[in-house]
Image: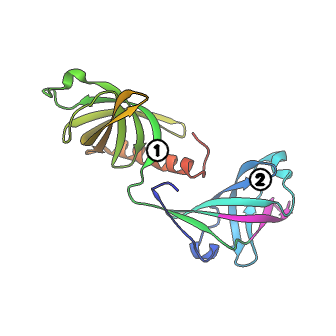
Amino acid sequence: MPKYLEQSEWPGLADLQPRPGERLRVESRTPRSRFTAELIGYRAGASVLISAPRAGLLAARISQGAPLTVRLMAGNRICAFSTRLLAVADGPYGYWHLEYPQRLEVQRIRAGTRVPVRLKVAVDSQDDEYLGAALLPCAGICTDISLGGACVETSQAPGGCGDRLYLTLRLRVSDIDQVLLVPAVIRNVQPAHEGGVARYRVGIEFQELEEEARLMLTAFVYQQFLVETGYIEEV
């Protein structure tokens, strides 16, 4: 389980109090597929009502009694449960009855969520008089990121603890593509060797983000979290 999640079991779906209209991810084993749907409602111990998945003929091939896995967000938690299809109704609109879950797996998002990524970045010094400035700017790979900082791998040490940097990175959220110039400070530098090639893992902390950059970063981290937990497809 990813480190940014805390897993627990809840007594029942009703205890999470999911709201009608919540987006669901429905996974079928036979045929192997994933659909999106909306929660209509539920009755404890009886069934869960969801909108008929918008997947055309593929969804129509799922027969009554078929096992399914459902994922949904409830506050700062992701819930997953196993169920089976009880009945399909066509009118007055399409909806499914699912067996009410006997057991839930609930994962709570920890504060300071850090998600794995593979982002090309550029690292430069904020200080023109920095003695190692001749080695900068340099390219790197951001391997994980949070709202407060990131881990960047470089082929050379961009500085030491306390040195101030600019990190340039390109983030994509849905159909929005934006380049950010983020001020940061180095918190740790660790040498690493991969395939006989010297590398450095640099832990950096973001400093004084502008509002637009902070909002974009928040949206990106949240999006990547949902991708990692299987709630949405990779963007």
Q: Quadrant of residue 78?
A: bottom right
Q: Which residue is mark 1?
A: 116
Residue nearest the observer in this picture, 228 or 216: 228
Earlier sequence position, callout 1 versus callout 2: 2
Question: Which residue is found at the position 51% from the left and 47% from the top?
Answer: 223
Q: Secondary structure at mark 2?
A: loop
Residue 50: x and y in percent read 73, 63
**What segment is highlighted magenta in the picture?**
81-99
When the figure is inspected, residue 230 is found, relative to residue 10, above or below; the finding is above
Question: Which residue is found at the position 20% from the left and 24% from the top?
Answer: 133
Residue type at the position of mark 2: Arg
Residue 166: x and y in percent read 27, 33
Q: Quadrant of residue 165?
A: top left
Q: Quadrant of the C terminus?
A: top right
The crowding category of the residue bearing disc 1, from other C-alpha atoms within 10 Å (few below 14, some 14 to 19, many at least 20), is some
Residue nearest the observer in this picture, 162 or 197: 197
Residue type at the position of mark 1: Pro
- The prevailing secondary structure element of the residues shown in magenta is strand
